[in-house]
Image (cartoon, rainbow, N blue to C red):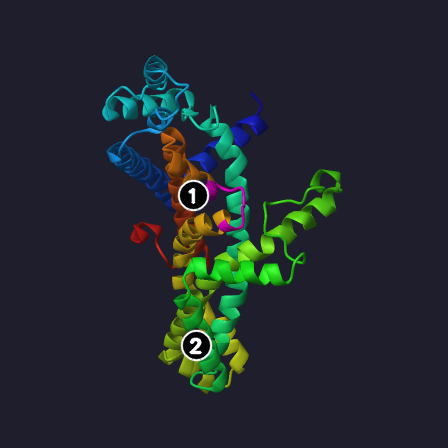
Amino acid sequence: MTSTAKISLATGWDWLIRLVTSETFIYVMKRLLQALLTLFLASALSFLVMQLAPGDFVTQLEADPKKSRDQIKALREFWGLNKSWVEQFWLWLWNIVSKGDFGPSFSYKRSVVSLLWERVPATLLLAIASLIVTWAIAIPLGIIAAIKQNRWADRVLQVISYAGQGFPSFITVLVLLFFAQITSPLFPVGGMTSINHSELNWFGKIVDVGWHMILPTIALSITSFAGLQRITRGELLDVLRQDYIQTARAKGLPENRVIYVHALRNAINPLITLLGFELASLLSGAFIAEQFFNWPGLGRLTLQAVMSQDLYLVMASLVMSAVLLIIGNLIADLMLKVADPRIRLENLN
């Protein structure tokens, strides 16, 4: 081995050791181990709740006169529904660990994994778009409300914020559906794409999906935007009262620099912490938006699975929602570390 190769190998080994012993790597590993325990407990509890519900998917088939008792019994045995819930849970868990198999969907007669691969991207697309719209509108308006405290602009924004938070999600969706009806065919409300979507070029397909996203994104963003605007206003007002802000003003720094460089930089930390919870609330809110706007996402799939008692599909959907929540919180913590290097990740547990 040449001296150059030895130096390269030593450098790579040192880099690997620094990576493995770094605060960020250790924190991520700890959070992932905690996530595994959280997912296990959440799955066990969800499985128990599903079992406490009267009947199962096969029970619905008993009303079909074409199905004999022997056929019903054979189906229950085929899907393992004749076993105790503990046996079913451990078998389901073992298949996930050993094969990556979340089981079959009783309703769709397909593997649950293939269904999730189809639906999760649609939900993430809607949630991320809503997150971008929410932050792009709420942060600037929160800053304006804080700067114009107790003036007419602040009072108007507070009224808008209270109104946005006071409206239930389903009412907001119904208002948007009514708006879509009176402006038809300007805003599409059914599905994710148009009938001629496959005939469009790549740019046309992007525009088509984006046009179908407008109303569902607005429906998801209104409540989140209202709450985030109020939090931004409150955090910025709190920072603006600090002594170092008054000192910066006394030194003659421009007001814009005081607000956007000194004040906002410190006020943004609590907002980043909320990012993970914001993603979780968007995912839960997507259930309503997807159902009303016929959006082919995870929320709509989960709701249909619960109604039909499609056990393994419900379980996989709940696990996927929990995974997205855990990832959202982890990303928020890492972003907080990047935004303020003084923060130690171990103190965020």
**Badge 1 amino acid:** Leu
Q: Which residues are magenta?
A: 292-300
Spot occupied by residue 249 in the image (x, y as percentages of width and height): 46, 84
> Dot 2: few (<14), some (14–19), or many (≥20) neighbours within 10 Å?
some
Label of residue 80 in the image: none
**Badge 2 amino acid:** Gln
Residue 144 vs residue 297, the one in the foreground: 297
Circles 2 and 1: CB distance less than 8 Å? no
Spot occupied by residue 137 in the image (x, y as percentages of width and height): 53, 66
Instruction: Identify the residue at image location x=38%, y=63%.
Output: 270
- The quadrant in which residue 223 appears is bottom left
Q: Quadrant of the N terminus?
A: top right
In magenta stretch: residue 85:
no
Q: What residue is disc 2 on?
A: 158
Instruction: Say how many tags the image has.
Output: 2
In magenta stretch: residue 297:
yes
Spot occupied by residue 65 in the image (x, y as percentages of width and height): 39, 21
Q: What residue is disc 1 on?
A: 324
Residue 254 vs residue 92, the one in the foreground: 92
